[in-house]
Image (spheres, grey):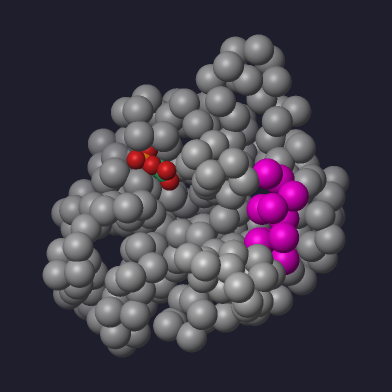
Amino acid sequence: MRRKVVAGNWKMHKNYSEAVSLVSDLKNELINENLKCDVIVCPPFTFLEAAHTVVKSSEIQLGAQNMHFEEKGAFTGEVSAEMLKSVGCEYVILGHSERRKIFEESDETINKKVRAALAAGLRPIFCIGETLEEREGGKMFDVLGTQLKEGLKEVDAEGMGKIIVAYEPVWAIGTGKTATPDQAEEAHQFVRKTLGEIFDDGVAEKTVIQYGGSVKPNNAAELLAKENIDGALVGGACLEAESFLEIVRAAP
Ligand code: PGA
Protein backbone atom coordinates (compact mmCIF):
# COMPACT_ATOMS: atom_id res chain seq x y z
CA MET A 1 0.00 0.00 0.00
CA ARG A 2 1.25 3.46 -0.85
CA ARG A 3 1.29 5.86 2.09
CA LYS A 4 -0.43 9.17 1.31
CA VAL A 5 1.70 12.31 1.21
CA VAL A 6 0.27 15.79 1.79
CA ALA A 7 2.53 18.71 0.89
CA GLY A 8 1.97 22.44 1.32
CA ASN A 9 3.30 24.76 -1.37
CA TRP A 10 3.43 28.17 0.27
CA LYS A 11 4.41 29.91 -2.99
CA MET A 12 5.47 33.55 -2.41
CA HIS A 13 3.60 34.14 0.84
CA LYS A 14 4.41 35.01 4.49
CA ASN A 15 7.17 36.97 6.16
CA TYR A 16 9.74 35.50 8.54
CA SER A 17 7.73 35.62 11.75
CA GLU A 18 4.55 34.42 10.05
CA ALA A 19 6.49 31.53 8.54
CA VAL A 20 7.95 30.49 11.89
CA SER A 21 4.59 30.69 13.57
CA LEU A 22 2.88 28.61 10.86
CA VAL A 23 5.41 25.77 11.04
CA SER A 24 5.41 25.94 14.85
CA ASP A 25 1.61 25.67 14.92
CA LEU A 26 1.73 22.67 12.57
CA LYS A 27 4.39 20.98 14.64
CA ASN A 28 2.58 21.57 17.94
CA GLU A 29 -0.70 20.30 16.56
CA LEU A 30 0.77 17.16 15.01
CA ILE A 31 3.31 16.29 17.67
CA ASN A 32 1.32 13.61 19.46
CA GLU A 33 -0.72 12.53 16.53
CA ASN A 34 -0.43 9.17 14.90
CA LEU A 35 -0.16 10.53 11.39
CA LYS A 36 -1.87 8.58 8.64
CA CYS A 37 0.11 10.37 5.94
CA ASP A 38 3.49 11.99 5.39
CA VAL A 39 3.48 15.78 5.73
CA ILE A 40 5.80 18.12 3.84
CA VAL A 41 5.99 21.91 4.04
CA CYS A 42 7.55 23.95 1.22
CA PRO A 43 8.15 27.54 2.36
CA PRO A 44 10.06 30.14 0.31
CA PHE A 45 13.88 29.82 0.27
CA THR A 46 14.39 32.56 2.88
CA PHE A 47 12.49 30.64 5.57
CA LEU A 48 13.82 27.14 4.93
CA GLU A 49 16.49 27.18 7.59
CA ALA A 50 14.17 28.60 10.24
CA ALA A 51 11.48 26.09 9.27
CA HIS A 52 14.02 23.28 9.51
CA THR A 53 14.95 24.32 13.05
CA VAL A 54 11.29 23.98 14.02
CA VAL A 55 10.37 20.77 12.21
CA LYS A 56 13.56 18.75 12.61
CA SER A 57 12.34 17.24 15.88
CA SER A 58 9.00 16.30 14.33
CA GLU A 59 7.70 14.09 11.54
CA ILE A 60 7.11 17.07 9.27
CA GLN A 61 9.49 17.11 6.32
CA LEU A 62 10.86 20.09 4.48
CA GLY A 63 10.84 20.93 0.80
CA ALA A 64 11.81 23.85 -1.42
CA GLN A 65 9.79 25.22 -4.32
CA ASN A 66 12.47 25.38 -6.99
CA MET A 67 16.23 25.11 -7.60
CA HIS A 68 18.77 25.55 -10.36
CA PHE A 69 20.19 22.52 -12.18
CA GLU A 70 23.83 23.57 -12.03
CA GLU A 71 25.86 22.58 -9.00
CA LYS A 72 27.43 25.99 -8.48
CA GLY A 73 28.83 28.96 -10.34
CA ALA A 74 27.99 32.37 -11.72
CA PHE A 75 24.20 32.11 -11.68
CA THR A 76 23.13 35.25 -9.87
CA GLY A 77 19.93 34.78 -7.93
CA GLU A 78 19.86 31.01 -8.17
CA VAL A 79 19.99 28.29 -5.52
CA SER A 80 21.46 24.78 -5.97
CA ALA A 81 20.27 21.38 -4.82
CA GLU A 82 23.26 21.09 -2.51
CA MET A 83 22.35 24.40 -0.84
CA LEU A 84 18.84 23.13 -0.22
CA LYS A 85 20.18 19.89 1.24
CA SER A 86 22.48 21.83 3.52
CA VAL A 87 19.55 23.64 5.16
CA GLY A 88 17.60 20.46 5.78
CA CYS A 89 15.46 20.03 2.67
CA GLU A 90 14.49 16.54 1.66
CA TYR A 91 12.18 17.51 -1.19
CA VAL A 92 12.00 20.07 -3.96
CA ILE A 93 8.98 20.98 -6.10
CA LEU A 94 9.98 20.95 -9.79
CA GLY A 95 8.05 21.73 -12.94
CA HIS A 96 5.22 23.55 -11.20
CA SER A 97 2.90 25.09 -13.80
CA GLU A 98 3.76 28.58 -12.53
CA ARG A 99 7.42 27.85 -13.24
CA ARG A 100 6.54 26.42 -16.65
CA LYS A 101 4.33 29.35 -17.61
CA ILE A 102 5.61 32.50 -15.89
CA PHE A 103 9.29 31.54 -15.92
CA GLU A 104 9.13 29.68 -19.23
CA GLU A 105 10.69 26.47 -17.96
CA SER A 106 10.72 23.80 -20.64
CA ASP A 107 10.48 20.05 -20.21
CA GLU A 108 14.21 19.97 -20.93
CA THR A 109 15.05 22.42 -18.15
CA ILE A 110 12.79 20.58 -15.74
CA ASN A 111 14.46 17.29 -16.66
CA LYS A 112 17.87 18.79 -15.87
CA LYS A 113 16.54 19.92 -12.51
CA VAL A 114 15.02 16.51 -11.74
CA ARG A 115 18.34 14.80 -12.47
CA ALA A 116 20.35 17.37 -10.51
CA ALA A 117 18.03 17.03 -7.52
CA LEU A 118 18.36 13.24 -7.53
CA ALA A 119 22.13 13.45 -7.89
CA ALA A 120 22.25 15.64 -4.78
CA GLY A 121 19.98 13.32 -2.81
CA LEU A 122 16.88 15.54 -2.94
CA ARG A 123 13.49 14.03 -3.73
CA PRO A 124 11.65 15.85 -6.53
CA ILE A 125 7.93 16.55 -6.36
CA PHE A 126 7.61 16.56 -10.12
CA CYS A 127 4.54 18.48 -11.35
CA ILE A 128 2.66 17.92 -14.57
CA GLY A 129 -0.73 19.10 -15.78
CA GLU A 130 -2.76 20.25 -18.75
CA THR A 131 -4.34 23.64 -19.40
CA LEU A 132 -8.08 24.03 -19.94
CA GLU A 133 -7.49 24.60 -23.64
CA GLU A 134 -5.51 21.38 -23.90
CA ARG A 135 -8.16 19.43 -21.99
CA GLU A 136 -10.99 20.81 -24.08
CA GLY A 137 -9.02 20.21 -27.27
CA GLY A 138 -8.71 16.51 -26.40
CA LYS A 139 -4.95 16.80 -25.86
CA MET A 140 -4.80 16.06 -22.15
CA PHE A 141 -3.28 12.59 -22.37
CA ASP A 142 -0.74 13.69 -25.01
CA VAL A 143 0.35 16.61 -22.86
CA LEU A 144 0.68 14.53 -19.70
CA GLY A 145 2.48 11.76 -21.59
CA THR A 146 5.00 14.19 -23.07
CA GLN A 147 5.63 15.97 -19.77
CA LEU A 148 6.26 12.61 -18.10
CA LYS A 149 8.51 11.21 -20.83
CA GLU A 150 10.54 14.38 -21.31
CA GLY A 151 10.73 15.35 -17.66
CA LEU A 152 11.87 11.88 -16.60
CA LYS A 153 14.38 11.29 -19.40
CA GLU A 154 17.47 9.43 -18.23
CA VAL A 155 15.99 8.82 -14.80
CA ASP A 156 16.43 5.17 -13.80
CA ALA A 157 14.10 3.02 -11.71
CA GLU A 158 16.05 3.76 -8.55
CA GLY A 159 15.75 7.51 -9.18
CA MET A 160 12.05 7.14 -9.93
CA GLY A 161 11.66 5.48 -6.55
CA LYS A 162 12.56 8.82 -4.99
CA ILE A 163 10.17 10.93 -7.07
CA ILE A 164 6.65 12.03 -6.20
CA VAL A 165 4.55 12.95 -9.23
CA ALA A 166 2.00 15.74 -8.71
CA TYR A 167 -0.85 15.90 -11.21
CA GLU A 168 -1.99 19.50 -11.18
CA PRO A 169 -4.45 20.50 -13.89
CA VAL A 170 -3.53 24.11 -14.61
CA TRP A 171 -7.19 25.16 -14.76
CA ALA A 172 -7.69 24.02 -11.18
CA ILE A 173 -4.75 25.86 -9.61
CA GLY A 174 -5.76 28.82 -7.48
CA THR A 175 -9.10 29.03 -9.29
CA GLY A 176 -11.34 27.32 -6.76
CA LYS A 177 -12.23 24.85 -9.54
CA THR A 178 -11.19 21.38 -8.45
CA ALA A 179 -11.04 18.42 -10.74
CA THR A 180 -13.80 16.06 -9.66
CA PRO A 181 -12.47 12.98 -7.89
CA ASP A 182 -13.34 10.98 -11.03
CA GLN A 183 -11.54 13.39 -13.37
CA ALA A 184 -8.48 13.31 -11.12
CA GLU A 185 -8.60 9.52 -10.80
CA GLU A 186 -8.76 9.17 -14.58
CA ALA A 187 -5.63 11.30 -15.00
CA HIS A 188 -3.84 9.48 -12.19
CA GLN A 189 -4.59 6.11 -13.78
CA PHE A 190 -3.11 7.42 -17.01
CA VAL A 191 0.00 8.69 -15.20
CA ARG A 192 0.49 5.31 -13.53
CA LYS A 193 0.00 3.47 -16.81
CA THR A 194 2.55 5.73 -18.51
CA LEU A 195 5.05 5.21 -15.69
CA GLY A 196 4.55 1.49 -16.26
CA GLU A 197 5.53 2.00 -19.90
CA ILE A 198 8.54 4.20 -19.14
CA PHE A 199 9.78 2.04 -16.25
CA ASP A 200 7.81 -1.06 -15.30
CA ASP A 201 4.62 -1.93 -13.45
CA GLY A 202 6.43 -2.43 -10.17
CA VAL A 203 7.85 1.09 -10.28
CA ALA A 204 4.48 2.50 -11.36
CA GLU A 205 2.67 0.78 -8.49
CA LYS A 206 5.05 2.21 -5.93
CA THR A 207 5.02 5.81 -7.19
CA VAL A 208 3.15 8.33 -5.08
CA ILE A 209 0.95 10.47 -7.34
CA GLN A 210 -0.44 13.57 -5.64
CA TYR A 211 -3.34 15.65 -6.88
CA GLY A 212 -3.06 19.43 -6.74
CA GLY A 213 -5.42 22.23 -7.71
CA SER A 214 -7.81 23.87 -5.24
CA VAL A 215 -7.59 21.08 -2.67
CA LYS A 216 -9.55 22.34 0.34
CA PRO A 217 -10.78 20.90 3.63
CA ASN A 218 -14.20 20.30 2.07
CA ASN A 219 -12.99 18.23 -0.91
CA ALA A 220 -9.83 16.56 0.40
CA ALA A 221 -11.41 13.41 1.83
CA GLU A 222 -13.24 12.60 -1.38
CA LEU A 223 -10.11 13.08 -3.50
CA LEU A 224 -7.83 11.19 -1.12
CA ALA A 225 -10.23 8.26 -1.01
CA LYS A 226 -9.55 7.45 -4.68
CA GLU A 227 -7.37 4.45 -5.34
CA ASN A 228 -4.75 6.23 -7.43
CA ILE A 229 -4.73 9.57 -5.59
CA ASP A 230 -1.89 9.16 -3.14
CA GLY A 231 -1.85 12.60 -1.61
CA ALA A 232 -2.29 16.28 -2.23
CA LEU A 233 -0.14 19.24 -3.18
CA VAL A 234 -1.91 22.13 -1.50
CA GLY A 235 -1.47 25.81 -2.34
CA GLY A 236 -3.95 28.35 -0.94
CA ALA A 237 -5.29 26.10 1.81
CA CYS A 238 -1.84 25.43 3.30
CA LEU A 239 -1.32 29.03 4.37
CA GLU A 240 -3.39 28.62 7.54
CA ALA A 241 -2.54 25.84 9.98
CA GLU A 242 -6.19 24.96 10.53
CA SER A 243 -7.11 24.33 6.90
CA PHE A 244 -3.85 22.51 6.12
CA LEU A 245 -4.33 20.28 9.16
CA GLU A 246 -7.88 19.47 8.10
CA ILE A 247 -6.52 18.26 4.76
CA VAL A 248 -3.75 16.25 6.47
CA ARG A 249 -6.35 14.64 8.73
CA ALA A 250 -8.59 13.83 5.78
CA ALA A 251 -6.10 11.18 4.62
CA PRO A 252 -7.75 7.77 4.98
P1 PGA B 1 -3.97 25.77 -5.06
O1 PGA B 1 -2.48 25.54 -5.59
O2 PGA B 1 -4.23 24.73 -4.00
O3 PGA B 1 -3.98 27.17 -4.51
O4 PGA B 1 -4.88 25.60 -6.23
C1 PGA B 1 -1.95 24.26 -5.77
C2 PGA B 1 -0.56 24.35 -6.34
O5 PGA B 1 -0.29 25.24 -7.15
O6 PGA B 1 0.31 23.52 -6.01
On screen, residue 162 above or below 249: below
The answer to whether residue 114 is magenta is yes
On screen, residue 55 above or below 222: below
The answer to whether residue 85 is left or right of residue 21 is right
The answer to whether residue 12 is magenta is no
On screen, residue 239 above or below 98: below
The answer to whether residue 128 is left or right of residue 18 is right
Q: Tell me the magenta residue range.
A: 106-115
Indicate the position of residue 51 as horizontal and vertical percent values: 29, 75
Indicate the position of residue 214 as horizontal and vertical percent values: 36, 36
Indicate the position of residue 165 as horizontal and vertical percent values: 60, 52
The quadrant of the image that shows the N terminus is bottom right
Q: Residue 177 or 170: which is nearer the viewer? A: 170
On screen, residue 238 above or below 79: above
Residue pictured at 43% horizontal, 49% vertical: 232
Residue pictured at 76% horizontal, 37% vertical: 146
Residue 157 in view here? yes
Q: Quadrant of ligand 1?
A: top left
The answer to whether residue 79 is left or right of residue 150 is left
Residue pictured at 71% horizontal, 45% vertical: 107
Q: Name the quadrant containing residue 217.
A: top left
Q: Residue furthest top?
A: 137
Residue 123 in view here? no
Indicate the position of residue 85 as horizontal and vertical percent values: 51, 81
Q: Residue 36 or 155: which is nearer the viewer? A: 155
> Which SS does the magenta portion mostly show?
helix
